[in-house]
Image (cartoon, rainbow, N blue to C red):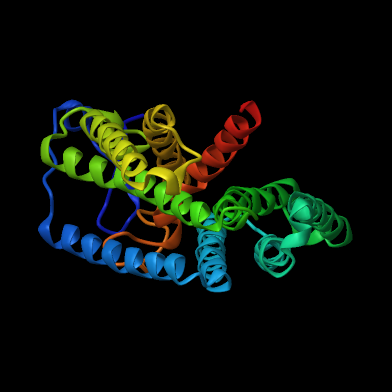
Amino acid sequence: MPPESPTSSGTYSPVSEERVSAPARPSIKPRTFFKRLVSWAILWVVVLFLVYSGWQAGSLLLIAFFGLAGQWEFYHAQEEKGHKVFKQSGLFCGALVFFNSWYFLIFRPDLARFVHFGIELVLVFAILGAFIRLVVRQEEHLAPITTAALTLLGLMYVPFLFNYVALLAFLPGDMEQNQFLLIYLLAVTKFSDVGAYVVGSAIGRHKMIPRISPGKTWEGFVGAILTSLVISMVMTHAMGARLHALSFADSIVLGLLLPLISVVGDLAESVIKRDASIKDSGRTIPGIGGALDLIDSILFTAPVLYFYLQFTSARS
């Protein structure tokens, strides 16, 4: 079967083997790049304002908004594919994940040790609820296991993973360091995307995984790694004691690890979009796409950074 290529409508159509195998050198589209640059600038201004203002509830609301918007887009992609999902129930459980973090990390930080217990409780509730609904109203679903699986996957893939941003930002302790850890995570992850886009658009010739994401190249992948590595080392050095959880050696390890994970997150969303035959998860953010297009890489890098810090702190 010949590979596929995205059409202007966002769906995919077959193309010839010769067209795919021929070296292609994509160019930077000024209009698209300008829209993306403006969106990045606005988002960074909002994030930095919330971080430095110390408005924790506002920061968590922003995290919850993008998390739930990304979950809705995931469910919408499955519906476009023709699958049935419990959209309202899944989004309700996703909201509970973020509410749990607000309650234990912001409203009752003295009970922060129960935050993971609360998340596990929500997941158990979601699994039980999905199967109880299938048992009670099974005749309405032609593929009941697929319905339950996709509903739970949407919950685990977006709110559960994105909630690690909240865990990094609001865990009790050194709040200033938490702020800089959040900025560090976003900078290393998103500048990886910038490096991949700029280098790949400028000199990219060798397709990385064209059957999943036709636009990604190995040159862009190298650009992502090098950009993140430089950003990681510069930020760790510049922040100094304000980011004491990370040593210079950590900055090198994370500068190489996080962009690798970021690419995995980006490709994971590409699999979802290709399966649903859509180009972007949404059109709410000019030059970027939807909320899921924005946070796809953070979904994977946030938990990796969280557990890396847990491991290094326990080791020391």
- The residue nearer to you, when weighing 227 against 121, is 227
Establish if 256 lies above or below 234: above
Residue 26 can be seen in this image: yes
**Residue 105 in which image quadrant:** bottom right
The structure residue drawn at horizontal position 83% and vertical position 60%, both measured from the top left corner, is 133
Q: Quadrant of the N terminus?
A: top left
Task: Where is residue 243? Give x, y as percent.
Answer: 45, 45
- The residue nearer to you, when weighing 188 against 30, is 188
- The residue nearer to you, when weighing 139 against 185, is 185
Task: Where is residue 203? Give x, y as percent.
Answer: 12, 35
In this rendering, position of residue 299 left or right of residue 37:
right
Residue 297 can be seen in this image: no
Q: Quadrant of the C terminus?
A: top right
Establish if 152 lies above or below 43: above
Task: Where is residue 153? Give x, y as percent.
Answer: 64, 48
Establish if 202 lies above or below 126: above
The structure residue drawn at horizontal position 38% and vertical position 31%, both measured from the top left corner, is 248
Task: Where is residue 173? Give x, y as percent.
Answer: 62, 53
In this rendering, position of residue 83 left or right of residue 210:
right
In this rendering, position of residue 312 left or right of residue 120:
left
**Residue 5 in which image quadrant:** top left
- The residue nearer to you, when weighing 149 against 290, is 290
